[in-house]
Image: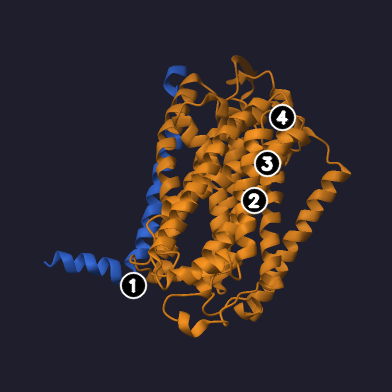
Amino acid sequence: MNISAMVLTFFTADGPGGMVVISVVVVASAVYFMLIRYILRGGEHSRK
Amino acid sequence: MALTYHPYNKNESVILDPLLRRVTARDLILWGGLLILFGLGVYAYLTQWFSGLGETGLGRPVYWGLYITNFVFFIGLAHSGTFISAILRLAGAGWRKPLTRAAEAITLFSLPFGVGSILIDMGRSDRVLNIIFFGRFQSPLLWDISAVSLYLFSSIVFFYLSLLPDIALCRDRLTNVPAWWQKMYRLLSLGWTGRPEQFERLEKVLDGMAIFMTLLVVTVHTVVSWVFGMTVQPGWHTALIGPFFLVGAIFSGTAAVVIVLALLRRVYHMENVLPVNLFNYLRKLLIVFTVAWLYMMLAEFLTTGYGNLADEMPVLWQKFTGDFALLFWTMGITVFILPIIIFIFLGKNNIGWMVVACISVNIGMWIERFLVIVPTETRPRFVSSLMDGFANYRPTWVEIAITIGLFSGLALLYLIFTRFFPIIPIWETTEDSETVLLTSENHA
């Protein structure tokens, strides 16, 4: 497998760039969703 | 029955007052005026949409004009919130607390207008989707889209998290507001009850996000500058362009915070919540930024002038003595000379002078953005010999109207926000705490 060719393709081919943008937003959404849930659940068990 | 805890803040009634104020004739005139100006921008945009970019002064080689100037300016303004909230949070500057939300709101509302400026500049805004389908990662424009979209998204979350306890407080305190308003608070508060563990976790997450946001703020404006810097055009192709943009962004953003705080203080009678010493702290920061901006400017021009390269010098002389000289020297006066005099000699304990200086800084910084972009395009590297006397740029009424519309839209959004949510963080500026007993139906 020619790794340098793969890396070059990533930068020069049509499409992968758009996937990066979508991936960034999707990963950020997941992380922020979990953080908000983590905050809201604070002290949930101690109150029951 | 469910318990909800809210920190006690002696200024709570003052902070909540703008939400309960009756709408006066003056309010209506102001909102109406801004709405009309925004509508003018929409009309101009529709004209451009149906008739094409030929309605603007843009063409070859000046393909970026007012719209991209606005883009860079709005992204710069957006750095105010992150700087005040995230960077000063990490630095442990407690004095920043009353002004964090006002600054973050500038970030939140400026970013969409920055992104919108790019879409407007494209002419066919729908083609932005081509980035998703055909995007190449070698293009700095794609880096820009990635960084700005992450910044916008993260800013919304950062802003929302610090607003959460106060939305819950509004939900529980403002019981006399219309039902839809109450419902909005209930939905947005996500059932927040203010347990100590929730506050503990919130602080922890905000601290963590502050580090991330600080990295983002540096990345975003550097990447914005690389849209220019990665080309080989004179005046743009310099490694200094990233830090130069960043310093300018934080400078104009902080100046914008001063203007907004002064207005809030005056209009909503928040003299006790936003004391003069806050402005004195900001004044010291602004002195540093003014000098840092001059340093960047001198470093850039000295390097270029000393190099005396054939392609670079026409752009430099365009600014110093050429077509853009009037704008250039106006920028020098409004960004450096006038503000530094005011900050050092007149601004201490004087909010009026601070506002004058900060308005001057922002006018000058907008001109600076314009001068970074347009003079280079009028004297591009590869066709400079063919362009003498031909490469001019004169914005049309469409571009000017859209620009006015964008700024009016920003002001209008900000005003609306202050009528629905506390613009000063109540929970962050608290001194003690009290327990409020509420019925369970008050929760989402």
Q: Which residue is mark 4?
A: B16
Q: Which residue is mark 1?
A: A14
In three-dimensional space, the C-alpha distance between marks 1 and 4, rounded to whole angstroms, equals 52 Å
In three-dimensional space, the C-alpha distance between marks 4 and 2, rounded to whole angstroms, equals 36 Å
Q: Residue at x 47, y 18 (%)?
A: A47
Instruction: Please name whichever residue, A29 or B190, is drawn nearer the observer in this view of the structure.
Output: A29
Chain letter belonging to callout 2: B
Q: In this rendering, do the residues under marks 3 and 4 share a single chain?
A: yes
Tag 3's secondary structure? Answer: helix
Q: Earlier in the sequence, mark 3 or mark 4?
A: 4
In three-dimensional space, the C-alpha distance between marks 2 and 3, rounded to whole angstroms, equals 15 Å
The answer to whether B31 appears left or right of A36 in the picture is right
Q: Are marks 2 and 1 in contact (CB under 8 Å)?
A: no
Q: In this rendering, do the residues under marks 4 and 2 share a single chain?
A: yes
In three-dimensional space, the C-alpha distance between marks 3 and 4, rounded to whole angstroms, equals 21 Å
Q: Quadrant of residue B58?
A: bottom right
As displayed, is residue B169 above or below residue B389?
above
Chain letter belonging to callout 4: B
Q: Are marks 2 and 3 in contact (CB under 8 Å)?
A: no
